[in-house]
Image (tube, rainbow, N blue to C red):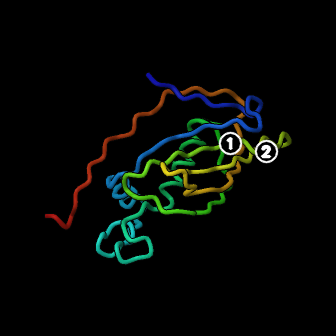
Amino acid sequence: MEMITNRTFDEMHVGDSADLVRTLTQRDIELFAAVSGDVNPAHLDPEFAKSDMFHGIIAHGMWGAALISTVLGTELPGPGTIYLDQTLQFRHPVRIGDTVTVTLAVAEKFPKNNRINLDCKAINQKGEVVISGMATVIAPTEKITRPRVAVPEVEIHDKSAT
């Protein structure tokens, strides 16, 4: 069984980092729309999207932000992290087929309250920064190791096709 283990406040140092790599699929966009309710045609309607400023379907910006949350909750610091604040700048669109590398790096530590600021970047396969920002968390002070929970399989049914 695969496990996830945190890094405690005392184990982390400025410059420590963790990353996650994902390739955006049409299914990701559809699942994100289903879960969030965000059915903006820029994400789901190819006819509309080709006439907007990006000239095609793009990912929901918060899809990329969710990847930042994934790293915080599973890698750095990991289980036991309390997410307090996040700034985000969306710099380039993410398109179906783009591979995004999300990297979080410890920027500052505040021992008084176990808070950590982490520099957040998402970079596409072309080397373009697509999202940047800063996260503030309360880092765990106790070591936690837990089994990685298997997420359920999800099927997408297009209501308009029936």
Q: Position of residue 137 (x, y in %)?
A: 70, 47
Dot 2 crowding, Cα within 10 Å, few <14, some 14–19, many 20+ = some
Amino acid marked by disc 1: Ala
Disc 1: which residue? 105
Q: State whether residue 16 is above or below residue 115.
A: above
Residue placed furthest toward the left: 162
Amino acid marked by disc 2: Glu
Dot 1 crowding, Cα within 10 Å, few <14, some 14–19, many 20+ = many
Q: Position of residue 143 (x, y in %)?
A: 67, 26
Name the side, left or right, on which 94 lies relative to 135.
left
Q: Position of residue 113 (x, y in %)?
A: 81, 43
Q: Residue at x 52, y 48 (%)?
A: 67
| Secondary element at tag 2 | strand
Q: State whether residue 18 is above or below residue 58.
A: above
Q: State whether residue 10 is above or below residue 48.
A: above
Name the side, left or right, on which 43 lies relative to 105.
left
Q: Position of residue 42 (x, y in %)?
A: 39, 70
Quadrant of the frame with the C terminus: bottom left
